[in-house]
Amino acid sequence: METITESAKVLYTARTHTTGGREHGVSKSSDGHLEITLSTPGTDGSGTNPEQLFAAGWSACFEGAMAIGARKMRIAFPEDTAIDAEVDLCSDKGQYFLQARLNISLPGLDREVARELIDFAHQTCPYSRATAGNVKVELNLVG
Protein backbone atom coordinates (compact mmCIF):
# COMPACT_ATOMS: atom_id res chain seq x y z
CA MET A 1 0.00 0.00 0.00
CA GLU A 2 1.32 3.42 -0.96
CA THR A 3 1.50 6.30 1.44
CA ILE A 4 -0.02 9.68 0.73
CA THR A 5 2.50 12.01 -0.87
CA GLU A 6 3.10 15.06 1.29
CA SER A 7 4.26 17.16 -1.67
CA ALA A 8 1.12 16.52 -3.73
CA LYS A 9 -1.17 19.51 -4.14
CA VAL A 10 -4.64 18.43 -3.00
CA LEU A 11 -7.18 20.02 -5.34
CA TYR A 12 -10.30 18.72 -3.60
CA THR A 13 -11.26 16.27 -0.89
CA ALA A 14 -14.64 14.53 -1.05
CA ARG A 15 -15.98 13.68 2.38
CA THR A 16 -18.86 11.31 2.96
CA HIS A 17 -20.33 9.49 5.93
CA THR A 18 -21.85 6.08 5.21
CA THR A 19 -23.81 3.77 7.48
CA GLY A 20 -25.49 0.46 6.68
CA GLY A 21 -23.29 -0.54 3.73
CA ARG A 22 -24.86 -1.90 0.55
CA GLU A 23 -27.99 -3.17 2.23
CA HIS A 24 -30.23 -0.37 3.51
CA GLY A 25 -27.31 2.05 3.74
CA VAL A 26 -27.19 5.82 3.57
CA SER A 27 -24.35 8.05 2.37
CA LYS A 28 -24.19 11.79 3.00
CA SER A 29 -21.57 14.29 1.91
CA SER A 30 -20.12 16.76 4.38
CA ASP A 31 -21.28 19.71 2.25
CA GLY A 32 -24.89 18.48 2.09
CA HIS A 33 -24.93 18.17 -1.72
CA LEU A 34 -25.24 14.38 -1.68
CA GLU A 35 -27.60 12.25 0.34
CA ILE A 36 -28.41 8.85 -1.08
CA THR A 37 -29.96 5.59 -0.02
CA LEU A 38 -27.99 2.46 -0.88
CA SER A 39 -29.27 -0.95 -1.96
CA THR A 40 -27.63 -4.22 -2.91
CA PRO A 41 -27.28 -4.58 -6.72
CA GLY A 42 -29.99 -6.68 -8.33
CA THR A 43 -32.48 -6.34 -5.47
CA ASP A 44 -35.77 -4.47 -5.26
CA GLY A 45 -34.22 -1.88 -2.93
CA SER A 46 -35.07 1.73 -3.68
CA GLY A 47 -31.49 3.04 -3.49
CA THR A 48 -28.50 3.12 -5.78
CA ASN A 49 -25.42 0.94 -5.38
CA PRO A 50 -21.66 1.56 -5.34
CA GLU A 51 -21.22 0.23 -8.89
CA GLN A 52 -23.69 2.79 -10.27
CA LEU A 53 -21.94 5.56 -8.36
CA PHE A 54 -18.55 4.41 -9.64
CA ALA A 55 -19.86 4.28 -13.24
CA ALA A 56 -21.26 7.82 -12.93
CA GLY A 57 -18.09 9.24 -11.38
CA TRP A 58 -15.75 7.53 -13.82
CA SER A 59 -17.69 8.53 -16.93
CA ALA A 60 -17.98 12.16 -15.79
CA CYS A 61 -14.26 12.35 -15.02
CA PHE A 62 -13.35 10.59 -18.29
CA GLU A 63 -15.41 13.05 -20.31
CA GLY A 64 -13.64 15.92 -18.56
CA ALA A 65 -10.26 14.39 -19.40
CA MET A 66 -11.27 14.12 -23.06
CA ALA A 67 -12.27 17.80 -23.06
CA ILE A 68 -8.82 18.71 -21.69
CA GLY A 69 -7.28 16.58 -24.45
CA ALA A 70 -9.34 18.37 -27.09
CA ARG A 71 -8.12 21.76 -25.82
CA LYS A 72 -4.51 20.54 -25.91
CA MET A 73 -5.03 19.21 -29.45
CA ARG A 74 -6.78 22.48 -30.40
CA ILE A 75 -9.88 20.76 -31.71
CA ALA A 76 -13.54 21.42 -30.99
CA PHE A 77 -14.93 19.04 -28.39
CA PRO A 78 -18.41 17.84 -29.44
CA GLU A 79 -21.11 19.29 -27.18
CA ASP A 80 -23.16 16.12 -27.53
CA THR A 81 -20.36 13.83 -26.31
CA ALA A 82 -21.76 11.00 -24.20
CA ILE A 83 -20.44 8.01 -22.28
CA ASP A 84 -22.51 4.98 -21.38
CA ALA A 85 -20.54 3.37 -18.57
CA GLU A 86 -21.10 -0.24 -17.53
CA VAL A 87 -19.47 -1.53 -14.36
CA ASP A 88 -19.86 -5.23 -13.61
CA LEU A 89 -19.63 -6.64 -10.10
CA CYS A 90 -18.20 -10.13 -10.65
CA SER A 91 -17.40 -13.17 -8.55
CA ASP A 92 -15.00 -16.00 -9.33
CA LYS A 93 -13.95 -18.69 -6.87
CA GLY A 94 -15.23 -16.65 -3.94
CA GLN A 95 -13.37 -13.48 -4.95
CA TYR A 96 -15.24 -10.31 -5.93
CA PHE A 97 -13.93 -7.92 -8.57
CA LEU A 98 -15.03 -5.27 -11.04
CA GLN A 99 -14.78 -5.01 -14.80
CA ALA A 100 -15.96 -2.11 -16.92
CA ARG A 101 -16.87 -0.84 -20.35
CA LEU A 102 -16.92 2.80 -21.34
CA ASN A 103 -18.99 3.20 -24.51
CA ILE A 104 -17.96 6.61 -25.81
CA SER A 105 -19.78 8.71 -28.41
CA LEU A 106 -17.86 11.62 -29.96
CA PRO A 107 -20.21 12.71 -32.77
CA GLY A 108 -18.66 14.48 -35.71
CA LEU A 109 -15.05 13.64 -34.89
CA ASP A 110 -12.84 11.66 -37.21
CA ARG A 111 -12.45 8.15 -35.73
CA GLU A 112 -8.65 8.47 -35.50
CA VAL A 113 -8.91 11.81 -33.66
CA ALA A 114 -11.62 10.40 -31.40
CA ARG A 115 -9.40 7.43 -30.56
CA GLU A 116 -6.54 9.83 -29.69
CA LEU A 117 -8.83 11.69 -27.29
CA ILE A 118 -9.96 8.42 -25.69
CA ASP A 119 -6.36 7.26 -25.28
CA PHE A 120 -5.35 10.62 -23.79
CA ALA A 121 -8.24 10.48 -21.32
CA HIS A 122 -7.45 6.91 -20.30
CA GLN A 123 -3.88 7.92 -19.50
CA THR A 124 -4.87 11.03 -17.51
CA CYS A 125 -8.30 10.41 -15.92
CA PRO A 126 -7.79 9.73 -12.19
CA TYR A 127 -10.37 6.90 -12.26
CA SER A 128 -8.60 5.21 -15.19
CA ARG A 129 -5.26 5.61 -13.46
CA ALA A 130 -6.66 4.19 -10.21
CA THR A 131 -8.04 1.12 -11.95
CA ALA A 132 -5.01 0.48 -14.21
CA GLY A 133 -3.83 -3.09 -13.74
CA ASN A 134 -6.69 -3.83 -11.32
CA VAL A 135 -9.83 -3.69 -13.45
CA LYS A 136 -10.39 -5.11 -16.92
CA VAL A 137 -11.56 -2.14 -19.03
CA GLU A 138 -12.94 -1.92 -22.54
CA LEU A 139 -12.96 1.50 -24.21
CA ASN A 140 -15.45 1.36 -27.07
CA LEU A 141 -15.88 4.18 -29.58
CA VAL A 142 -19.55 4.12 -30.56
CA GLY A 143 -21.17 6.50 -33.02
Image (cartoon, helix red, strand yellow):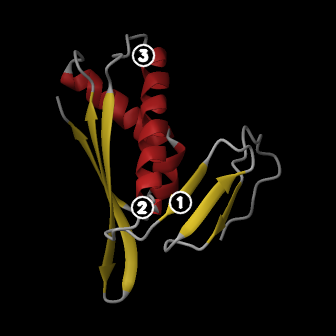
Q: Position of residue 80 (x, y in %)?
A: 31, 20
Q: Residue at x 70, y 44 (%)?
A: 32
Determine which residue is flagged by label 3.
73
Give the vertical position of 90 relative to 79 (above or below): below
Q: Residue at x 17, y 28 (%)?
A: 143
Q: Residue at x 76, y 45 (%)?
A: 8
Q: Earlier in the sequence, mark 3 or mark 2?
A: 2
- The answer to which of 110 and 100 lies nearer the viewer is 100
Q: Is residue 108 left or right of residue 133?
A: left
Give the vertical position of 90 relative to 120 (above or below): below
Task: Identify the element where label 2 is drawn.
Answer: loop
Residue kind at label 1, given as amino acid type: Thr
- The answer to which of 41 and 69 lies nearer the viewer is 41
Task: Identify the element where label 1 is drawn.
Answer: strand
**Residue contact between numbered discs 2 and 1, judged by CB atoms under 8 Å:** yes
Give the vertical position of 47 relative to 104 (above or below): below
Q: Is residue 79 left or right of residue 48?
A: left
Determine which residue is flagged by label 1.
37
Q: Earlier in the sequence, mark 2 or mark 1?
A: 1
Q: Earlier in the sequence, mark 3 or mark 1?
A: 1
- The answer to which of 102 and 1 lies nearer the viewer is 102
Residue kind at label 2, given as amino acid type: Ser
**Residue contact between numbered discs 3 and 1, judged by CB atoms under 8 Å:** no
Q: Residues within 10 Å of mark 1 (few under 14, many from 20)?
A: many
Task: Identify the element where label 3 is drawn.
Answer: helix
Number of marks drawn: 3
Determine which residue is flagged by label 2.
46
